[in-house]
Image (cartoon, rainbow, N blue to C red):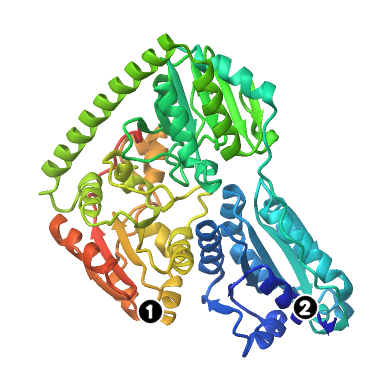
């Protein structure tokens, strides 16, 4: 059909089921904003800075499982968004990131704001391109959509010159159906894995975000129950989604953050199944550098062959769709395991279940004891939140030194789909991500747990929450410091840090008035003084229909090495 480039783009996005376009425009993006006027197929979501814009698109795509679309301004806008693009890249979020570009007739002069946008975005995308002819735009959209949504999923980038957007041409806007990527693994790989797992005396499972993103939680639970094996999720620094039910008797919490503690945690296992996670993405170098004990035989399942054996040699590797492969693994294990092996697995599972029950009871008791303290301890804060959240809650977490995977360790998270933890560690992500999740799931309550430092990187997103009345509950875990950096400095054995002295790591004198700040953006806000008040405020806010911020003072001491196990 004969159409302008920008209209062709919108027609193809509508065919792809895109409903939201997240953006912060400049001059080179105005053809898009003009074309959206009166087009009820889309809802344009504006944020006054690119960090929350990208994070909103990221959260929306992760929650919906659909293509997220974000439109940024030329060079400076893309530059502002790069930290959030890095997050999406590390998460594997299917995003179509677009930015306007200067008119092709002006580019040779290297005009204001011009740069090689495709080259800037390329390191943190699956594909990055500048469309040079309006006739190529449909093919670029088709390619971008397929690449973003095909495992290993991830963001793609398109630079769109102004004249390509406004020029007309005879364009083929056909959008074919997406590929079916449920690819079965080779049978010999599955059988090799079954032989190792069925004969293991002390099996375990390491699991991560891609299990829940590929709808394979039930299949993973089945494998764990057959083996009587503990399921251990990724470390707190890379723990993005919840791949195993937190209240299940076999859920064994998360890996510690540091190599020595990881080795200690895994030392008693002989065979470990790895599913849906990168092995491993460590945070800070520690000796010994190899976190996986050498005696462990690894069975590694992933849809991306690059991940298998990338850092640690495997005894059996399985390339295939996560859901299909785990289902076949469970079926073959049932057939292969002898009666004696099945009995041993049941005994292991029963012992684990009893240990986990006791650990949860002890943690709740400790939370009760700490709940009378003011300011609240991290555990007391999280226990107060745990008492308030409904079963269908979605939790977005960017407060790693406070949250401490306590919601999981307390057994308080009752669904696996609704947890979103920070994976890329580009700060400012959580606030915008929560808004995107709420737009994807308008009928589910959404809670954002944010550190005060992280929140300030994307605080402009509060304006979007108020403007579009997106009813997220924001809890600011406020210890007025970059606590994770203080912990890291001590872990690096820096001399002044060991004496408790730090430079540039405190957010005090003055402290940020988050209640006043939120109200200035049009968001209702309160400060919680104690655990009971926090529980009541969170419960009421999650049941409401407006955005609300709750500022919570947290103890300001600096703990030693964090333990997320």
SS for dot 1: loop
In-front residue for pair 181/380 = 181
Residue 270 placed where, x, y %? 48, 14
For the point 69% across and 34% down, the residue is 305
The quarter holding residue 203 reads top left
Q: Is residue 373 above or below residue 290?
A: below
Q: Is residue 462 above or below residue 231?
A: below
How many other residues sit within 10 Å of disc 2, few (<14), some (14-19) or many (≥20)?
many
In-front residue for pair 263/478 = 263
- Would residue 240 be visible to someone looking at this image? yes
Q: How many marks?
A: 2
The quarter holding residue 78 reads bottom right
In-front residue for pair 195/334 = 334
The residue that disc 2 covers is 8
The residue that disc 1 covers is 521
Of the residues tagged 2 and 1, which is closer to the observer?
2
Which label sits on residue 121?
none
Specify whether 311 is left or right of 485. right
């Amino acid at each position: 059909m004969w159409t302008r480039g920008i209209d062709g783009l919108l027609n193809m996005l509508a065919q792809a089921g895109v409903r939201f376009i997240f953006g912060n425009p400049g001059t080179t993006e105005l053809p898009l904003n003009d074309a959206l006027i009166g087009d009820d197929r889309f809802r344009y979501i504006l944020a006054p800075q690119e960090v929350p814009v990208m994070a909103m698109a990221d959260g929306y795509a992760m929650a919906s499982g659909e293509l997220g679309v974000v439109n940024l301004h030329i060079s400076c806008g893309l530059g502002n968004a790069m930290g959030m693009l890095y997050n999406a890249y590390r998460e594997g979020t299917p995003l179509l990131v677009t930015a306007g570009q200067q008119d092709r007739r002006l580019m040779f002069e290297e005009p204001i704001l011009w740069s090689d946008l495709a080259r800037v975005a390329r390191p943190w995308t699956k594909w990055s391109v500048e469309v040079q002819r309006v006739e190529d735009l449909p093919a670029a959209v088709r390619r971008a959509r397929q690449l973003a949504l095909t495992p290993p999923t991830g963001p793609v980038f398109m630079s769109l010159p102004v004249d390509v957007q406004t020029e007309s041409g005879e364009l083929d806007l056909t959008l074919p159906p997406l590929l079916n990527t449920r690819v079965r693994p080779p049978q010999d790989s599955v059988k090799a894995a079954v032989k190792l797992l069925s004969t293991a005396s002390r099996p375990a499972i390491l699991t991560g975000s891609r299990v829940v993103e590929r709808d394979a939680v039930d299949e993973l639970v089945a494998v764990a129950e057959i083996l009587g094996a503990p399921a251990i999720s990724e470390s707190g620094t890379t723990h993005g989604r919840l791949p195993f039910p937190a209240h299940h008797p076999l859920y064994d919490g998360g890996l510690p953050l540091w190599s020595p503690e990881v080795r200690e945690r895994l030392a008693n296992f002989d065979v470990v199944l790895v599913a849906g996670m990168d092995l491993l993405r460590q945070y800070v170098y520690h000796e010994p550098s190899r976190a996986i004990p050498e005696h462990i035989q690894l069975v590694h399942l992933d849809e991306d062959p690059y991940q298998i054996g990338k850092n640690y040699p495997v005894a059996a590797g399985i390339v295939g769709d996560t859901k299909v492969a785990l289902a076949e693994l469970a079926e073959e294990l049932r057939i292969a395991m002898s009666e004696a092996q099945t009995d041993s697995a049941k005994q292991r599972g029963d012992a684990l279940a009893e240990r986990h029950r006791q650990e949860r009871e002890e943690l709740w008791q400790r939370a009760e004891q700490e709940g009378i303290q003011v300011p609240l301890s991290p555990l007391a804060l999280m226990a107060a939140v745990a008492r308030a959240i409904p079963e269908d809650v979605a939790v977005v977490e960017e407060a790693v030194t406070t949250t401490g995977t306590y919601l999981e360790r307390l057994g308080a998270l009752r669904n696996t789909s609704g947890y979103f933890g920070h994976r890329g560690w580009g700060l400012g992500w959580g606030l915008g991500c929560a808004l995107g999740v709420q737009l994807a799931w308008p009928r589910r309550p959404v809670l954002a747990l944010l550190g005060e430092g992280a929140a300030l990187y994307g605080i402009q997103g509060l304006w979007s929450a108020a403007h579009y009345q997106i009813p997220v509950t924001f809890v600011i875990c406020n210890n007025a410091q970059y606590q994770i950096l203080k912990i890291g400095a001590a872990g690096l054995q820096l001399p002044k840090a060991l004496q408790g002295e730090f430079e540039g790591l405190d957010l005090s004198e003055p402290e940020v008035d988050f209640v006043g700040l939120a109200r200035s953006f049009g968001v209702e806000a309160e400060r919680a003084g104690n655990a009971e008040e926090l529980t009541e405020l969170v419960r009421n806010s999650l049941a409401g229909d407006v955005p609300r911020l709750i500022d919570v003072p947290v103890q300001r001491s600096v703990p030693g090495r964090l333990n997320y196990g």
